[in-house]
Image (cartoon, coloured by chain):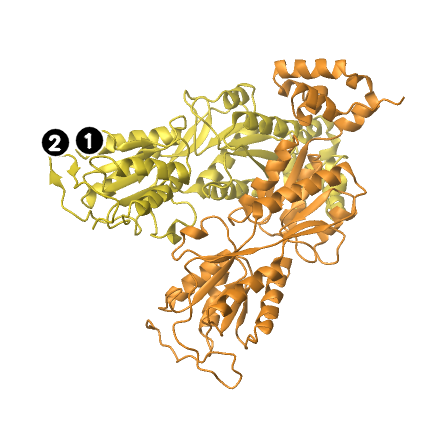
Chain colours: A orange, B yellow
Amino acid sequence: MVQRQVTMRDVARSAGVHPGTVSRVLNPRTRELVNPATAGRVEQVAREMGYSLNPIARGLKTRRTFSVGVLIPDLENPLFPPIIRGIERVLDAAGYTALVASTDGEPARERQRLEALIARQVDGFVIATAQRRHPVVADAIASGLAVVLVNRTIDGGGAFAVVPDDRRGAALAVAHLAGIGHRSIGHIAGPQETTTGLLRYRGFMEAMDDAGLAAGPGMVAHADAFAVAAGAACARGLLAAAAAPTGIVAANDLLALGAYTAIAEAGLRCPADVSVVGFNDMPFTDRFAPPLTTVHIPHGAIGARAAELLLERIEDPAATPQTLMFEPTLTVRASTAPPARRPRRDGSGATAARAPRGAGPRR
Amino acid sequence: MVQRQVTMRDVARSAGVHPGTVSRVLNPRTRELVNPATAGRVEQVAREMGYSLNPIARGLKTRRTFSVGVLIPDLENPLFPPIIRGIERVLDAAGYTALVASTDGEPARERQRLEALIARQVDGFVIATAQRRHPVVADAIASGLAVVLVNRTIDGGGAFAVVPDDRRGAALAVAHLAGIGHRSIGHIAGPQETTTGLLRYRGFMEAMDDAGLAAGPGMVAHADAFAVAAGAACARGLLAAAAAPTGIVAANDLLALGAYTAIAEAGLRCPADVSVVGFNDMPFTDRFAPPLTTVHIPHGAIGARAAELLLERIEDPAATPQTLMFEPTLTVRASTAPPARRPRRDGSGATAARAPRGAGPRR
């Protein structure tokens, strides 16, 4: 009869500690970090279970550091802390520590962070900084590192990724505005080198088509960053168009906040004059003036699932890459309302003609 | 003539790279992480300058990992990302990487994070999780780790720390409310086991005394966490008091948001019925309904200074502990206004008597 090999996980379970603690106790370099009572208990359990008697298995196991690198483009975007919280919830339960580094979206900084974490011998990475064509990430995956992408993914497959259904989210936003009577709807698109920017844009265009509302020229503005200032610049452009939109779908909540700024600057009101829909439902959107209607993404669940996938990938380097897509919902708050004035049908029946505006308030 | 010893920093300067890159190139375990052209240039410069000819100096130098651990209690509190940004700005310039871990304020998790980062051989720590009596932090400092506390500090000295002047901040808030006519001012105090909670409370009480406005019984509510729900619970208590305050000073912005919730629940309006002052001026406070009057703390500067102190401490383990206190200012927005009704003086001349209220709105 073959007896099953005792694993570090078995010892951890018997001793009532995390596998990471067992690893630290059995590694002479880190033993002193564990409190003496716990360390003594772990050693005794390991001895009783015959775990320390297998130096080969132990060598294999202690190569694990039970730490994981998490790369974030911008910690000041409130979207990311809930993702990190989800990641930590799963890693904590498995005895792993998340080490978070932010990159400012700069490739040089990203490579440096990745290198620093590899030098610190992390067991894998959750990466939220992916761009569609991304040499650093592609190299990391090709070199055999355990990597799971979160929120954004790369073009061309080959990666583990957990993302929102961006197209569907944009479609929900368009359907909401169209459903309450908007015919002239603009889009503040995110950076097109990210899948979130590209797919939300495509989802917007497809949904406009489906609703019989062709997005006219000047009705899509491209932001160079997912940031408030970029959103304001784009919204100024949309509001200055000949047929300014009565509704705006922004590719994320920071861009939507920028739209609030531009609407106020133009002497207009949200939602009385212009409705705004955000994307993400990041923390505090319910506190804004006005509270933001936005596409809700379950970021905690996305982060947690990414961490689970990473742990599976660490256990099984031969696992097949997979992309998990989470379904969004729409959270309707006070930034959207039916358009104030009946649209005047033009020849196409699609766009709402608007009276020319001066700098003053329009009612 | 004694020639000055060539340092890793000299090599980095000549090669036009960060010291961390030089360290990685000269360490066989990490050399492959640096792109080959850069690595070649660094090796050539090091050879030319005679740097690699001194194995003892090199051994000493390469013990550095050019990484720093940053412990944060709660990444979802928007106060911390600007502090981290300030830390990263300074560390980046010096070729260091910040590895951020969050603790949820739980001592067990904090010890585990600290251990994991020590096992990853970071060169030092910036710690934002300090409580006044804090065995984990005290042990870390006593064991000779390079540690700088940020935002909060510990009782009893012996630590490097960069903090806001919490007492003065609370005094600014009281002076503002008193200056626009409030006589009945309440306080939502933060957890008293943190210096931020304790000193803002003390600053509030002292400033009330100075203004001749004794804070009556029931006018201070103690929150068990710096969080929205705790702020709402406290504000409900304050608003139910016999002499409910016309102004509330909250010990941070999340507590102030909780006060907004409680004010709305009671059918009251901010600022028409109750003024609210927050503390921190965290991101997005200008976007809230109403935009929040709050004590502004220069968090980016505080983070940057903490990182500078840490780099000094890493260079010089014998450096004398010091506490740097940053001056706050008051940012006045729309959550504060003169009290609607003239206070009716009671015997003490201190508190405003108020008509009993039902559940309905009060005007």
Q: Quadrant of the N terminus of chain A?
A: top right
Residue B158 vs residue B345: left or right? Answer: right
Residue that sits furthest to the front in the current view: B359
Name the residue carrying label 2: B348
Q: Give the residue type at disc 2.
A: Ser
State the SS at label 1.
loop
Query: In the picture, residue B202 is in which quadrant?
Result: top left
Residue A194 vs residue B186, the one in the foreground: B186
Q: Quadrant of the C terminus of chain A?
A: bottom left
Q: Position of residue B294 (x, y in %)?
A: 33, 44
Q: CA distance from mark 1 to mark 2?
A: 9 Å
Q: Which label sits on residue B222?
A: none
Q: Chain of mark 2?
A: B
Q: Is residue B241 visible in this depiction of the protein?
A: yes
State the SS at label 2.
loop
Q: Are marks 1 and 2 on the same chain?
A: yes
The reply to whether callout 1 and callout 2 are in contact (CB within 8 Å) is yes
Q: Position of residue B181 (x, y in %)?
A: 18, 44
Q: Is residue B47 visible in this depiction of the protein?
A: no
Neighbor class of circle 1 (other Cα within 10 Å; few <14, some 14-19, many 20+) is many
Above or below for B328 versus A108: above
Mark sitting earlier along the chain (1/2) = 1
Residue B26 vs residue B349: left or right? Answer: right
Name the residue carrying label 1: B214
Q: Position of residue A38 (x, y in %)?
A: 63, 16
Query: In the picture, residue B92 is in which quadrant?
Result: top right
